[in-house]
Amino acid sequence: MGRAKIQKKVTALEQRLVVSWSRQLLVGEGWVFLDWKKPADGGAVAAYKIERRELPASGWTLISMAIESEATLNNQERGKEWEYRVIATNKAGEGVPSNTVAAVL
């Protein structure tokens, strides 16, 4: 079975508001610490949306919002493999979702 390549038209805003990770995430007993770099371009960031999904890949769920470029997510369900991503937002809209990081709690 072949794979179809999906193309997305990227707006000028999305090209600028790109979040990247500062370091690998830190994981503890039911918590995850995420740390990312602010976008280099695209204007002031109003907030960051933090999303996660259970692996194998399922749909993304908004689990938190942050104003700073880091967040500690408490009460994360244990015994599952989670994948996290961050999306920068401002008055013009949302940027491109970051690359993902995964953790088994």
Image: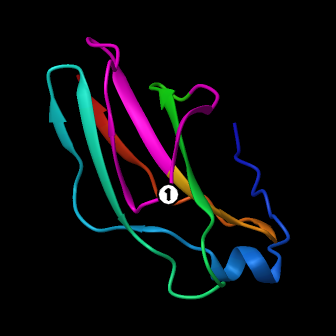
Name the quarter where the C terminus is drawn. top left
Q: Which residue is mark 1?
A: 67
Q: Is residue 70 left or right of residue 60?
A: left
Q: Position of residue 90 (x, y in %)?
A: 71, 68
> Does residue 56 lie above or below 15 as drawn?
above
Measuring from the top left, give residue 32's x and y in whole percent. 26, 35
Q: Is residue 18 left or right of residue 15?
A: left
Q: Residues within 10 Å of mark 1 (few under 14, many from 20)?
A: few
Dividing the image into 4 quarters, which one contains the N terminus? top right
Q: Which residues are magenta?
A: 58-85
The picture quadrant where one finds residue 58 is: top right
Vertical side of 67 occupied by 16: above or below? below
Asked whether 46 or 5 is in front, the reply is: 46
Provide the secondary structure element on which disc 1 rests. Answer: loop
> Which residue is rendered at x = 27% and y = 13% of the image?
78
**24 with respect to 14 (left or right):** left
Name the amino acid, label 1: Ile
Specify whether residue 51 is painted magenta.
no
User: Residue 82: x and y, percent?
Assistant: 38, 29
The image shows residue 55 at horizontal and vertical percentages of: 44, 26
